[in-house]
């Protein structure tokens, strides 16, 4: 059992010669705790790896801490092109160099995106050169930086556009 302080104790109940019971308590070995923590960490890794959204995290200096494979897929990056420690600006520069983001210099893009990285969650849609639309939601992660979720919303945007055009005809 786990105590209120977070430590684990093993409780052993044994009947007495009368009608009672004797309970003995001993500290449990840490192995089950470490095993459970490793199992939970593995679950988080699986969740992160299999998310349908591209997810990444930046530190307070706007340097990439981590990212999942879906993030790379959404933007067409190779796995070795984006790595922890890269600045937000360097990632935008790479996107411009590869033709993923055709709309200007990395400095202009970073300046336009700077307002996303504030103290409140914000969402913006980004148009990519291949015609897709990626919705990017930025959420503050305490004092440590930001979590960024990216989702391909191209089909939704096209549907809304077509619906709007139909409504205009009516």
Image: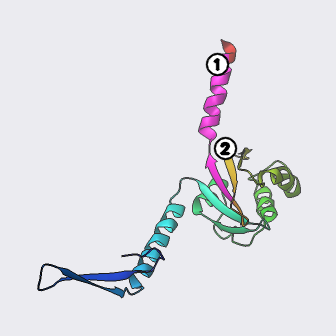
In x, y percent, where is residue 88?
78, 62
Nearer to the camera, 93 or 27: 27
Q: What secondary structure is the stretch in magenta mostly built from? A: helix
**Name of the residue lying farthest toward the front:** 18
Q: CA distance from mark 1 to mark 2?
A: 22 Å
Q: Quadrant of the C terminus?
A: top right
Q: Residue at x 85, y 57 (%)?
A: 106
In x, y percent, where is residue 169?
67, 14
**Highlighted magenta segment, given as a residue range:** 147-167
Instruction: Decide if residue 11 is on the left or right side of residue 90.
Output: left
Q: Which residue is mark 2?
A: 132
In the rendered image, residue 50 lying in the magenta stretch gets the answer no
Against 88, is 118 above or below? above
Total labels: the figure holds 2
Q: Which residue is mark 1?
A: 166
Against 23, is 42 above or below? above
Label 2 CA crowd tier, 10 Å (few <14, some 14–19, many 20+): some
């Amino acid at each position: 059992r786990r105590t209120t302080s977070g430590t684990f104790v093993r409780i052993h109940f044994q009947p007495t010669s009368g009608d009672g019971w004797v309970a003995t308590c001993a500290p449990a070995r840490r192995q089950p705790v470490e095993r459970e923590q490793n199992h939970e960490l593995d679950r988080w890794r699986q969740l992160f790896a299999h998310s349908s959204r591209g997810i990444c995290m930046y530190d307070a200096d706007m340097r990439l801490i981590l990212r999942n494979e879906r993030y790379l897929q959404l933007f067409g990056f190779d796995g070795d092109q984006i790595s922890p420690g890269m600045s937000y600006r360097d990632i935008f520069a790479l996107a411009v160099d590869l033709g993923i983001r055709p709309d200007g210099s990395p400095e202009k893009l970073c300046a336009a995106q700077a307002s996303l990285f504030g103290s409140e969650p914000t969402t913006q849609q980004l148009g990519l050169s291949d015609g897709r639309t990626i919705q990017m939601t930025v959420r503050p992660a305490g004092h440590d930086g930001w979590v960024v979720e990216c989702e391909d919303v191209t089909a939704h945007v096209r549907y809304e556009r077509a619906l709007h055009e139909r409504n205009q005809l009516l």
